[in-house]
């Protein structure tokens, strides 16, 4: 693999860098730095989406006919890396990287025409209704029942850990449409309006005090039959496609490496209490080097997956390898941040708002300010999208053939 950029790629990198320097407002950069989670609040995320959409770069991963940028895998990677280096907010994963690929891959022409432009414009903000109180790792056991009545499904059940359900106006759900067949064959994938009498949302506050996830109650909620994606019973196949995108659809290494750079810069200034600085401490250096090497290895795997996708080869179970490594590294980096920033990371209450007009000024920097909150929040990385134990099983079975 040739890891050098070509002159054209370097020119593209400079174009992205110049765009970010000119168009990423300080308010959003600070908001992203002060967000303890990958799911940035819509008041940051949607503003950044609108700026990228105006440039035609928001849905860069989509096929060109639906609004994609037509970039090569290397260009995608350069874009993600430059965004990470500039401290841009994460893109809204649930809409852009999860439901959109399902719609343009499995949707009808009407579904594509109705929903994809509304994601780009920001009119629709999606959440994901897969997990249930009794169905997480064993997702095929889900019980939420959809019964056909005329041109609608009437849906009863409950979804849990639903990220940003309190912000979303749309939800994509796995529902059971048939109880007589094999579990997987009785599941369908439906799109629904959140704003309807049959849906209520209860907040779940996390350890860091954040309101990120929810429980969603479906009590005679309605979904139009025309809003089912694929045929009745296709839900499992579509969910597997979506989960592979969730696990490997983003490049994690650039953010991990950028965060490591910030932590290391801080450590070069931070007295170690013995007349030196933290960056000179042998144990510290060993820990940072270990994480940096693993992040570099992850970068190569992510580049390979992008290149496979560009050649028309689906990423498949390789995405489980990415999910497993990236989630553990996220936690390693966030632990290094807590150790480096120390008391600076604990100066403020962990709950928001940590950005915006009313936010208290950070004692050190926004990244230091959220170190503890990020550390707590990133416990979820080894759980959401399928736990590490489940990813290990997928790798053992489908990659190693064990
Ligand atoms: C921050 C966060 C955000 C989330 N957002 C969403 C969302 O937006 N939408 C959504 O649908 N879901 C969401 N989830 C839910 C997530 O997908 C589930 O939590 C996850 O699939 C695990 O399911 P569970 O919590 O029911 O745990 P369980 O499945 O009950 O697992 C409990 C423990 O047992 C282990 N275990 C279970 N089965 C096996 C096995 N066969 N072999 C070995 N070990 C096993 C697990 O690894 C885990 O350690 C989110 C979760 C988190 C933490």
Image (cartoon, helix red, strand yellow):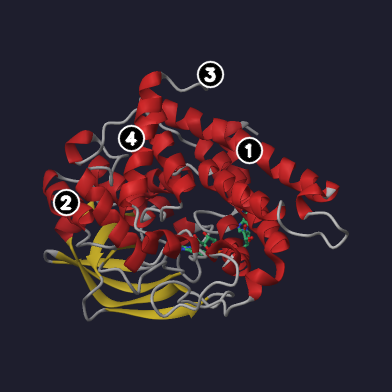
Q: In the rendered structure, find residue 117 and report the number of the disc placed on it.
A: 2
| Distance from Cα at disc 1 to Cα at disc 2 | 39 Å
Q: Residue furthest right?
A: 274
Badge 2 marks a residue whose secondary structure is: helix
| Distance from Cα at disc 4 to Cα at disc 2 | 26 Å
| Distance from Cα at disc 4 to Cα at disc 1 | 42 Å
Callout in the foreground (3, 2): 3
In the rendered structure, the answer to whether residue 324 lies left or right of residue 85 reads right
1 or 3: tag closer to the N-terminus = 3
| Distance from Cα at disc 4 to Cα at disc 3 | 24 Å
Number of residues whose C-alpha sits closer than 10 Å to that of mark 2, classed few (under 14), some (14–19) or many (20 or more): some
Callout in the foreground (4, 2): 4
* Residue under label 4: 15
Badge 1 marks a residue whose secondary structure is: helix
In the rendered structure, the answer to whether residue 373 lies left or right of residue 163 reads right
Badge 3 marks a residue whose secondary structure is: loop
Badge 4 marks a residue whose secondary structure is: helix
Q: Residue at image x 48%, y 45%?
A: 85
Q: Residue furthest front?
A: 275
Q: What is the x, y in percent for residue 225?
A: 17, 59
Callout in the foreground (4, 1): 4
Ligand 1 within 8 angstroms of badge 2 C-beta: no
Q: Nearer the viewer, residue 229 or 206?
A: 206
Number of residues whose C-alpha sits closer than 10 Å to that of mark 3, classed few (under 14), some (14–19) or many (20 or more): few
Q: Nearer the viewer, residue 398 or 314?
A: 314
* Residue under label 3: 1
Q: Are marks 1 and 2 in contact (CB under 8 Å)?
A: no
4 or 2: tag closer to the N-terminus = 4
Q: What is the x, y in percent for residue 172?
A: 30, 60
| Distance from Cα at disc 1 to Cα at disc 3 | 26 Å
Number of residues whose C-alpha sits closer than 10 Å to that of mark 4, classed few (under 14), some (14–19) or many (20 or more): few
* Residue under label 1: 396
């Amino acid at each position: 693999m040739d890891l050098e950029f070509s002159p054209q790629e370097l020119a593209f990198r400079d174009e992205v860098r110049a765009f970010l320097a000119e168009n990423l407002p300080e308010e959003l950069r600070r908001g992203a730095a002060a967000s303890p989670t990958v799911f940035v609040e819509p008041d940051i995320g949607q503003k950044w989406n609108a700026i990228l959409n105006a440039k035609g770069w928001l849905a860069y991963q989509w096929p060109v006919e639906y609004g994609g940028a037509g970039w090569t895998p290397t260009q995608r990677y350069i874009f993600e890396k430059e965004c990470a280096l500039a401290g841009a907010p994460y893109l809204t994963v649930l809409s852009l990287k999860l439901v959109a690929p399902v719609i343009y891959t499995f949707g009808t022409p009407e579904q594509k025409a109705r929903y994809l432009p509304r994601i780009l414009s920001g009119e629709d903000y999606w959440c994901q209704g897969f997990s249930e109180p009794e169905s997480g790792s064993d997702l095929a056991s889900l019980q939420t029942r959809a019964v056909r009545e005329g041109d609608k499904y009437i849906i009863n059940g409950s979804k849990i850990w639903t990220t940003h359900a309190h912000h979303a106006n749309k939800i994509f759900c796995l529902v059971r449409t048939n109880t007589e067949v094999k579990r997987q064959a009785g599941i369908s994938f439906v799109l629904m309006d959140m704003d309807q009498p049959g849906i209520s949302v209860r907040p779940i506050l996390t350890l860091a005090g954040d309101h990120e996830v929810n429980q969603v109650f479906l009590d005679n909620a309605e979904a139009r039959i025309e809003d089912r994606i694929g045929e009745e019973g296709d839900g499992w196949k579509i969910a597997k496609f979506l989960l592979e995108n969730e696990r490997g659809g983003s490049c994690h290494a650039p953010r991990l490496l950028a965060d490591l750079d910030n932590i290391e810069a801080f450590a070069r200034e931070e007295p170690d209490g013995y007349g030196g600085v933290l960056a000179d401490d042998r144990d510290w250096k060993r820990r940072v080097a270990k994480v940096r090497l693993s992040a570099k290895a992850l970068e190569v795997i992510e580049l390979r997956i992008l290149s496979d996708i560009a050649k028309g080869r689906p990423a498949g179970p390789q995405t489980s390898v990415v999910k497993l490594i990236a989630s553990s590294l996220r936690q390693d980096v966030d632990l290094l941040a807590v150790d480096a920033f120390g008391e600076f990371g604990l100066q403020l209450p962990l709950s928001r708002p940590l950005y915006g007009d009313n936010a208290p000024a950070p004692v050190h920097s926004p990244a230091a300010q959220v170190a503890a909150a990020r550390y707590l929040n990133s416990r979820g990385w080894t759980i959401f999208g399928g736990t590490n134990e489940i990813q290990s099983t997928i790798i053992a079975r489908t990659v190693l053939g064990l």
